[in-house]
Image: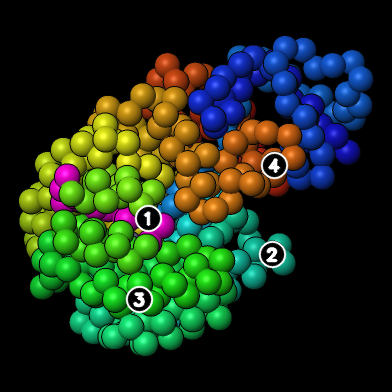
Amino acid sequence: MRTAYTGCDIIDGTGKRFRGFLTVEDGRIASIGEGELPESTGAAERRDLTGKTVLPGFIDCHVHLRNDGIADPRAQAAADTDAVATLRSARNARRTLEAGITTIRDCGSRGGIDFSLRAAAAQGLCETPRMMLSGLMICMTGGHGYTLGVEADGPDALRRAARAQIKAGADNVKLIASGGILSPGSEIGAPQFTVEEMTAAVEEAHAAGKTACAHAHGTRAIKNAVRAGVDSVEHGYLIDDEGIELMIERGTYLVATSSAVRNVVRHGTAAGIRPHVVAKAEAAIEQHVEGFKRAYKAGVRMAMGTDSGVPFTDHGNNLDELVYLVEMGVPPMEAITIATLNSACLLKMDDRIGSLEAGKRADFVVVDGDPVADIAILQDRSRILEVVLDGRTMVSRQAA
Ligand SMILES: [Zn+2]
């Protein structure tokens, strides 16, 4: 059955916008165009979306469904059994979908629960965005995130760890290339893993047709990860000019996760966040904003990620990140492209998703108002009127 959506403002994900229509059949976009729906279009159902904006489904390239964005997610992770964390992940996935995110990349789960969740969703047991998964994060012995990840040292061990995640079903290999904000006792600037170690894991990912990304804050960690060939640097808070040049040369994406650092600084110890976490975020935030601005101006490729599941970056608030991108100088239309087509490119899924084009999967969001005129509209879930995934309406709200 073909459904036609007419009279809407369409932002197609490539930077173009026009008033027009799209038709959907068998989960795909059958046609899209400017102006009136052609008479020849045999559409069994017609939906008039006059006054609404239709955008591609948004893509968040960095979430952790296993945790809620509460003050101390590490304590929650320690208390949860895998079974509880699976149910938590299912709820968080649904919240993410309700915010207009139709594809996520989970950047580190536990106990195989991300793969179980995808299997459960495929059987209709729960509703989730389309999920690209990493399995366990791979870190060095005692490295950032070791309580939840898998430890490996030396190129052979990294190669094996990457293969194990891919064997379990990973679409992406997540490496920890530096210390982090949440782990006690690690400096975020400190490099972890050598170039040789990461290269082995990246080779395995790419040989299997998967992607690889690296959590990297410090200047040296960023360069190590880029030299190892990762597809994206996550966070990159302390990036310098040499790192920027290297990323441009190699075509590496930056997934800035501005939400993560801002929310820790905004809520602080008063909200129950551990003091060492707040201190590290406060020390990094200015460099993050400055570094992002320089990287963006220089032309580093950008994809959208939030790190949802870290303190006060909760699932369902993902599109706050677009507001932060705009605050840091990205024009609203480009922020939308970053969170749609660019992110699909990073995930190597731009042949299927990321923009509204005939033949692609019918993943789109109907928004009340014009997010280019006011990007903050996207933060208001009551204005995300409809979320369509693979042609199926997953979320439907009435305009206020
Ligand atoms: Zn993360």
The residue carrying mark 3 is 138
Real-space Cα separation, disc 4 to disc 2, in angstroms: 20 Å
Mark 3, Cα crowd under 10 Å, few <14 / some 14-19 / many 20+, is: many
Question: Are the residues tagged 1 and 4 within 8 Å (C-beta)?
Answer: no
- State the SS at label 2: helix
| Left or right of residue 81, residue 390 in this image | right
Residue 263 location (% of width, % of height): 23, 46
Viewer-nearest of discs 1 and 4: 1
- State the SS at label 3: strand
Q: Compared to 320, does 281 lie above or below? A: below
- Residue 232 is marked as 1
Label 1 vs 4, first from the N-terminus:
1
The residue carrying mark 4 is 360
Label 3 vs 1, first from the N-terminus:
3
- The amino acid sitting under disc 2 is Ala
Viewer-nearest of discs 1 and 2: 1
The residue carrying mark 2 is 122
Q: Quadrant of the N terminus?
A: top right
- State the SS at label 4: loop
Label 4 vs 2, first from the N-terminus:
2
- The amino acid sitting under disc 1 is Ser
Label 2 vs 3, first from the N-terminus:
2
Q: What residue appears at the point 33 percent right and 48 percent down from the top-left corner? A: 249
Real-space Cα separation, disc 2 to disc 3, in angstroms: 27 Å
- State the SS at label 1: strand
Span colored in magenta: 230-241
Q: Compared to 130, does 190 lie above or below? A: below
Label 3 vs 4, first from the N-terminus:
3
